[in-house]
Image (cartoon, helix red, strand yellow):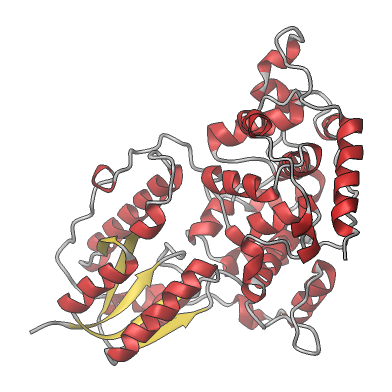
Amino acid sequence: MKQTVSIFWFRRDLRLDDNAGLYYALKGGHPVLPLFIFDTEILNQLEDREDARVTFIYQTIEALNNELREQQSSSILIKYNSTGQAWNEVLAEYDIAAVYTNHDYEPYARHRDAELKELFTQKNIEFYTYKDQVIFEKGEVVKDDQKPYTVFTPYKRKWYDKLKPFYLKPYPTRKYLDNISKTSPFQLPTLKSMGFAESKTHFPDKQYKTIIAGYHEQRDFPAIKGTSHIGLHLRFGTVSIRQLATDAYGAEEKTWLNELIWREFYMMILYHFPQTADHAFKPEYDRIRWRNNETEFKAWCEGKTGYPLVDAGMRELNATGYMHNRVRMVVASFLSKHLLIDWRWGERYFARKLLDYEMASNVGGWQWAAGSGTDAAPYFRVFNPELQLKKFDPKLQYVKKWVPEYADFSKYPEPIVDHAFARERCLKVFKEALSKS
């Protein structure tokens, strides 16, 4: 006889505390079997066999599994396969009453979940999904006519107006963990068996509270620890957005909370306008004639452009999987405006390298830099990397750390392009594209 269970499917919510879908699964009336799928349709697209994000996920799942084993005599069922094949295996092994998970808003995930819902319906299995990685989602913060906002500031005002204590209330999952299925330990496939090697990358911790108060004054200076580096944990759900928002809302200064709202704004945009994952939000910007010089793109990727702030940012990214947010704006503007290289090239490179890669925020940020996104600023906003350096790294502490040869001008390359020339070229190309009917 197969055991009748409910499945809780871990995805972007790798924690036991304050987990919406897990909470409802545990209260659903059947023993809950936790499941995680190493999805080959995602893993096979990764270029780097030492991708640090795979190591982070692996170590997190391993820690969750150990905790469940020690505290509840339970274990996470681990599958390494395409999602469809993995679920066929699970359906063959168990009598499943219901499947519980949390919403994912990216195009691939929405398509995947729609197909699975059809499969579960055919099998008479209930499929429940819940909001967990944001405070407000989809159509919860919209204009009075129910249309989505496309400008951040009015969205932010409505977000604050809608916020009530209810939305920040944590789910008491620990209270119901005894309802987890008691199982013998399941085998965890090795990283090597999945074709990956363990990354030695240092992963940031979850300590963010000390950053909040001074964030508005320190966040633009890459040489100091003025940001929380919490993005990795938000991306994979090892922290609760409700806890983060509670702590941020309770602070006198709201700049850090506003950054969480930006994240939700971009998730809302991607949900309502999924085509923006690889097309300009403003369609006329898809008419730009990008130069797409591969030699210059390589120099940008390697941090060898002759602009020290740009080069420092790219080298920090390549070495650590992280780049300071102010510098992200500068390097993105440089690629799309100075070099006239399609913003999608840069977005894909960030997708490959960033530990905290989040499609909605990354696409939103790149389109902001290219001028093609929701931002109302005109296309002729072009960051001057030299002025940005003087303003935000005046003592060259950040540059000296990542571009040590900058101290010896004989070893540091000349700028790949002159700023004034590049700006004029950019304005001409953009104006030409946008003037077409």
Left or right position of 339 against 421: left
The residue positioned 26% from the left and 62% from the top of the image is 79
Left or right position of 358 against 211: left
> How many discs mark residues in the rendered view?
0
- Quadrant assignment, res 74: bottom left
Relative to 7, residue 293 above or below: above
Image coordinates for residue 179, horizontal then vertical, percent: 28, 79
Image coordinates for residue 276, horizontal then vertical, percent: 66, 65
Relative to 99, residue 243 above or below: above
The residue positioned 51% from the left and 60% from the top of the image is 239
Relative to 50, residue 4 above or below: below
The residue positioned 72% from the left and 80% from the top of the image is 141
- Quadrant assignment, res 23: bottom left
Q: Is residue 302 visible?
A: yes
Q: Image quadrant for the C terminus?
A: bottom right
The residue positioned 68% from the left and 46% from the top of the image is 227
Left or right position of 89 against 35: left
- Quadrant assignment, res 286: bottom right
Q: Nearer the viewer, residue 137 or 297?
A: 297
Q: Which residue of the protein is positioned furthest toward the left in this rendering?
A: 1
